Image (cartoon, grey):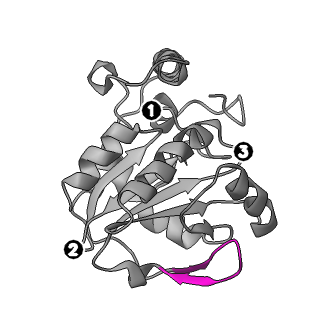
Amino acid sequence: MEPQNPEIEPTAAEASGAEPLEGSTGEGHGAQNDDVGEAPGRTRKAMWLAMGAVALALGLIWLAPGIDHFDESSSTATGDPDDALATGKVAPMHFTLKDMNGEAVDLASFKGRVVLINFWATWCGPCRAEIPSLVELQDQYRDDLTVLGVSIDDEAEKLKPYAAEFKMNYPVLVGKDHQDMQDAFGPLYGIPVSVIVGRDGRIAKKHSGIATKEQFEREIKALL
């Protein structure tokens, strides 16, 4: 997990295992961040570096060969503070995006199903690590769940071979040039970010950073 711009201080998303978005500093996102205090520069930077080191170590443990389960209770990285604020809100499902094959996909058409919207990119290491779990979940809960992979800045032609390589069995949408959708589900300080929407059209959970299959599955089951 390395920032794209080393001069930018790590954000809360980085501490949760997310890959920071270019130019994202966690500032300028409106009133949602008004009650977040500003610490002195050196102290704040040291704090984020320490949290990032802890998150990186936990991520390496989780991805290590032979590790089948990640004890999330042992992690001090709980995602972005805005994640909890999203819970219970009506999901902005009024967007229509094209998939990697050029077909229009209306998010509202999935009303009545559980939807897991995963914001990702081909250059994102944590996103790549998360994809196999999403593939398994889509297969396992295909009758009730739709996973939507929204690539934030990749061209469709780049997505096709990537989706084939990872056997992505769910719609892969082109989110490039759809900053309005990212803002509606955001703020997104890094990726991956996953938003789980219940059958009632409300956000049940938002994850900034990588999540385990066990986490996703528990949250999906609660909505079935």
Residue 34 highlighted magenta (yes or no): no
Task: Give above or below for 131 relative to 212.
Answer: below
Q: Nearer the viewer, mark 1 or mark 3?
A: 3
Residue kind at label 1, given as amino acid type = Ser
Label at residue 123 = 3
Residue indicated by mark 2: 200
Q: Is residue 204 above or below residue 11?
A: below
**Secondary structure under badge 3?**
loop
Is 60 displayed left or right of 39 in the figure?
right
Image quarter of residue 126: top right
Farthest right residue in view: 157
Q: Is residue 89 left or right of residue 138?
A: left
Q: Nearer the viewer, mark 2 or mark 1?
A: 2
N-term mark: 3 or 2:
3
The residue tagged 1 is 16
Residue name at image x 41 percent, y 52 percent: 137
Per the model, the C-alpha gap separating discs 1 and 3 is 18 Å
Which amino acid is tagged 3?
Trp
Q: Residue at x 71, y 76 (%)?
A: 101
Q: What is the crowding at mark 2: few (fewer than 14 residues within 10 Å), some, or many (at least 20)?
A: some
Q: Residue 129, image x and y in percent?
A: 57, 37
Is residue 128 at all visible to an observer of this figure? yes
**Does 117 sit above or below residue 188?**
below
Give the SS element for disc 2: loop
Q: Nearer the viewer, residue 31 or 82?
A: 82
Q: Bounds of the magenta span?
A: 96-106
Q: Secondary structure at mark 1?
A: loop
Percent across and percent down for residue 39 are: 42, 26
